[in-house]
Image (spheres, rainbow, N blue to C red):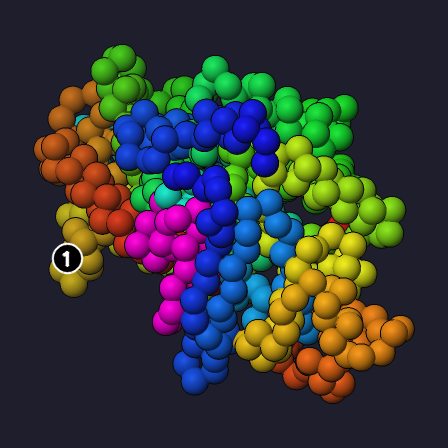
Amino acid sequence: MDASGDAPILEAKDLTRKFGDFTAVDHLTLSVSNGEIFGLIGPNGAGKTTSIKMLTTLLPITSGSATIAGHDVQKEPAAVRHSIGYVPQLISADAQVTGYENLWVFARLYAIPREERERRIEEALDFMGLAEVQNLLVKNYSGGMIRRLEIAQALMHRPHILFLDEPTVGLDPLARDAVWEQIERLRSRYGTSIVMTTHYLEEAERLCQRVGVLHRGRLVGLGTPAALKAGLGRADATLEDVFAQFAGEGESISGGYREAGRTRRVAVRLE
Amino acid sequence: MSPSVSSELARGRPTPPGRLSEWVGQAGAIVGLEARKLAHDPSELLFRAVQPALWLVIFGGVFSQIHVIPTGAYSYLQFLTPGILAQSVLFIAIFYGIASIRERELGIITKFLVSPTPRVILVGARGLSASMRGLSQALIVVLLALALGVGLNFSPLALLGVVVAVVLGSALFSTLSMIIASIVKTQERFLGIGQLLTMPLFFASSAIYPLSLMPSWLRPVALANPLTYLVDALRTLMLPGEIGQFPLYVDFGVLFGVTVLLTVIESKLYPRMAQ
C-alpha cells in the first residue's frame, strides 16, 4: 500500500457510469497527486457525486478504470476502502449517540488496534476542536460541529485520500470558515490528499490547487484556478466566469426533485 | 509529506482485512452502537411492553375463561405465553428496516459501506443488534407471566435456550425487514408492507392456537412460516414437560438456516442503499 513518491494517489481513466440510457459520468480521466487538494466543480446533476461514489467503491463502474494508492477500485475494493476516507454530502454522523461514540464505532470498523484506539479518538477530537463536546449527543451539535465530527470520523484511520462531497453545504459563513481551516490544517499536518466537490466557487478558489469543471458528466475544464481564469483572457475574470464559460449560462435541468429535496433537508438539519 | 509523517501513516494503518478478530471487532462495533442508542433512549423498549401485556392479560384472560382452545395438560395462559413472546419478537423486528431507510435518507449507510467492513458482517451484526430489543421483550413477557402466576420452566439450560431462540428469531425477522427496506427504499411503502406482513405471519403460526386446530389449507402455510418454529422452540423450552410439535434441533435448524439465507441475500441488496 505504498503511496509515497511521485506516483499519483488517484488515477481515473475513462471512468463512465450509465443509468439506463442516461450517462451520468462520461469518460472522466484525471489524476490527483500526493498531498493535493483537488476540486470538482459543476452544477447540480453534473456528475460530481456519481464520480465520487464510483471512486469510493459505492457504485459499480460501467466502463473505464480507477486506481487509488495503487489499488484498482474494481478489483481490490477492500484495499481501496482502507486507503480512503469519505464524508458524504448528506449527514452521516449518528444523532442518537455522542460524538465520542460516533468515533468509537468507526475506529473499530477500520480495525484500529485496541492499544491505539483511544489515542486516535482523542487526537481526532482535539484536531477537530470537539474535545469539550465529545460526550454530548450529536443531536445537540451545531451544523459546523457535525461536519467537523464527520471529517474526524473519516480521518482516524489516516486515509491516503479524503473525499469530501460538498463539505460546507448548508453552513453559515462562520462555520464554513472553521471547516475550511480544518481542511487546510488536515493537509499540512497529515499530508492527506483531498478530493472535494463543491458548487461554491469561492471555496474551490481558496482551498484547491487544481479544479476540474464537470458539465453533463464530462470534464470540460481542468487546471489551477489561476490558469482557468487566465484562459478567459480577461484581467478581472473570476471562477464564476470560468464556470459560466464551461458550463453554459442556462440552469441545469438535471438533479430534479429528489436531489433538491435532499440538499434542502441537509441544509435544514444543519441549521 | 515529511518522512516522519509518512512513517507514522504507514505504522498506523491497519493491515488489509481478512482476519477473524477484525470481523469480530467490526460486528462488536455495530452491536455496541445499537446498545448505546438504546441506553441513551430506552423509551421505545418501555412502550413496547404495552402490547404483550394487553395480549396476555386481556386476550389470554378471556380465552382462559371459555376453554375453547384445546391445550392438553396446559392452561391456555401457559400455552399462550411463549406465543406472545414470539409475537413480540416478530412485531419489534419486522419494523427494524425503518432504521435502514432513515440511515439511507441521511448519509449514514454510505459511511458504513465505504468502511472496510465486509457486507455480510455489516448485515449480520445489524441482525444481532435487533436481538437486544427482542431480549428486552422476553424479559417483559417472563415478568408478566410470573405476575399472572403462569407456571414456566426456569431451569438455567431452558433459559439459555430461550435467549438463543429469541436472538435467532429477532435476527431472522429484522433481516427480512431490512431486505424489504432495501427493495422498497421509502418509508411509506415500507410501513405499508410491514403492516401487510405482520398479521398473516402471526395468524398463520401456532402462536395463539395449535396447528391441529387450523383448517387443512392453512397448515402448510404455517409449516412454511418461520414464526411457527420460533413459537415451537419457545414452547418446548418455557413449559415444563413435552409439548413441542418438532424436536428442538428442527426448530433451531430452521431458524438458523433461514437467518443465514436472509443475511446472504441482504448483504447483496444492502449496498444498493448507497447508490
Q: Position of residue A111 (x, y in %)?
A: 42, 29
Look at the image and say whether residue A72 sits in the magenta stretch.
yes
Could you tell me the amino acid type at mark 1? Pro
Label 1 neighbourhood size at 10 Å, few (<14), some (14-19), many (20+)? few
Q: Position of residue A108 (x, y in %)?
A: 46, 29
Chain ID of residue with mark 1: B
Asked whether residue A173 is in view, the answer is yes
Tell me which residue sits at (20%, 29%) in the image.
Answer: B236
Secondary structure under tag 1 reads helix
Span shown in magenta:
A54-78
Tell me which residue sits at (16%, 22%) in the image.
Answer: B241
Image position of B209 (left or right of A26): left
The residue indicated by pointer 1 is B220
- Res A104 → quadrant: top right
Say which of B40 and A247 sits in front.
Answer: A247
**Residue A264 vertical placement versus B115 (above, below):** below
Asked whether residue A104 is in view, the answer is no
